[in-house]
Amino acid sequence: MKIKIEQLKAALKFFNEKAEKLSNLSFTESVRKHNTGLSITATRNGDGDLVSTSERRGPKSESIDAFVLTFRFFIQNNERCSLKRMAEYYESMQIGSSFKREFQEIRTLTNKFLDAVPDLHVEIDGRLMTRREIVEMVIYGNLSHANEKKRAIYQSWTRSEISQDILDYTFVFILSRVTLPIRELQDLNLRVLATLN
């Protein structure tokens, strides 16, 4: 793929613009500064039955929605700043191999993280979902685009308050961890742009 230098520079700058926006959103600040977590409590009622309750702490729904609106730029392959498109740009650029290697290492670790099963399991039809599948289920089954299949899976998982809180907590945790490699790529892009100028 042959891309003009100005297109490459524009794509790197656009990625950095969106990365900067992510880091300045209230979601990111909430995850960094506040006690984000999940508590599940089980007590016996007067009949001796076990009653469970849950409480999720962390970013509120509006904050998550705003974050996802920008985050989608990095995961939707049709966007010029998606991680997949960035890999194509880095491959095509006439830059030092150390830059390309650094990009590939960040991308590989990010994909490894997303393709693993989280510690707090989300199981659908007897199969544990990966972090990537959870992110896609929540984004495309609830927050945007409402893919019918993903929507049905999302609704089947969130029938109870506890399962909703588990899913929300897991989703927030995954998003917060993926902001780290995005910041690393932002820094890498700045260094690459300096050499392209």
Image: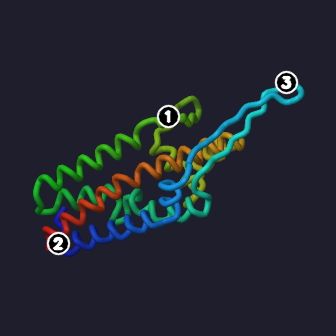
- Residue drawn at x 52%, y 33% as measured from the top left: 128
Kindly report which numbered mark, 1 or 2, lies closer to the viewer in this rendering. Answer: 1
Q: CA distance from mark 3 to mark 1?
A: 31 Å
Disc 3 on helix, strand or loop? Answer: loop
Q: Which mark is residue 119?
A: 1
Name the quarter where the C terminus is drawn: bottom left
Whole-percent x and y of residue 6?
Answer: 20, 75
Q: Viewer-proximal residue, 182 or 124?
A: 182
Q: Residues within 10 Å of mark 1 (few under 14, many from 20)?
A: few
Residue behind mark 2: 5
- Say which mark, if any, is on residue 27: none
Q: Amino acid at mark 3?
A: Gly
Q: Nearer the viewer, mark 3 or mark 1?
A: 3
Q: Where residue 48 is drawn, which disc sits there? A: 3
Q: Earlier in the sequence, mark 3 or mark 2?
A: 2
Horizontal relation, residue 96 to residue 39: left or right: left
Measured from the top left, where is residue 22 in percent x and y?
43, 64
Structural crowding at the residue carrying mark 3, measured as other residues with C-alpha within 10 Å and reported as few (<14), some (14–19) or many (≥20): few
Q: CA distance from mark 1 to mark 2?
A: 43 Å
Image location (x, y in percent) of residue 123 = 57, 34
Q: Amino acid at mark 2?
A: Ile
Q: Could you give the CA–CA distance between mark 3 and mark 2, rounded to whole angstroms?
A: 70 Å
Q: Going from the N terminus, do you reach mark 3 or mark 1 first? A: 3
